[in-house]
Image: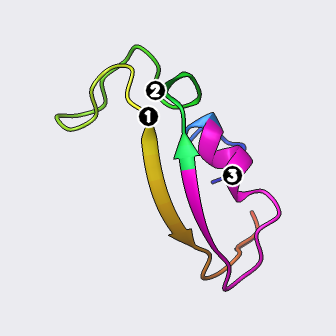
Amino acid sequence: MIGWGHIEKGCDRGLMGMKVGGVRKLFVPAHLAYGERAMGAHIQPHSNLHFEIELLEVLTRDD
């Protein structure tokens, strides 16, 4: 959910302006991801994150 703090700030920025059916490759540097924190067993502190995202649907808060 963009802007609600449910995903890291870097993803919020990377998803803005996408259209349904669009695909983006995102690189989120550590300072915009989890920074000094580990996340689970697989994301270590100071990790850069890479995503390939396809926007399938847009829902509003009313959905």
Who's the residue at 63% across and 54% down the image? 1
- Determine the residue located farthest toward the bottom in the rendered image: 21
Q: Residue 27: which disc?
A: none
Crowdedness near tag 1: few (<14), some (14–19) or many (≥20) residues, C-alpha within 10 Å: some
Instruction: Name the kind of residue labelled 1 in the image.
Output: Asn
Residue 59 lies in quadrant: bottom right
Q: Earlier in the sequence, mark 3 or mark 1?
A: 3
Q: CA distance from mark 2 to mark 3?
A: 16 Å
Farthest top residue in view: 36
Residue highlighted by disc 2? 34
Question: Which residue lies under the disc numbered 3?
Answer: 14
Residue 39 falls left or right of residue 3: left
> Disc 1 on helix, strand or loop?
loop
Residue 31: x %, y % from top left: 55, 22
> In which quadrant of the rendered image does the C terminus lie?
bottom right
Q: Please, what is the three-letter code of the amino acid marked with disc 3?
A: Gly
- Residue 7 position (above or below residue 31): below
Which residue occupies the extreme left position in the image?
41
Amino acid type shown at disc 2: Tyr
Please report the bounds of the magenta region as a residue range. Answer: 10-26
Q: Is residue 19 above or below residue 33?
A: below
Instruction: Name the residue beneath numbered marker 1.
Output: 48
Viewer-side label of 1, 2: 1
Asked whether residue 15 is in view, the answer is yes
What SS does tag 3 mark? helix
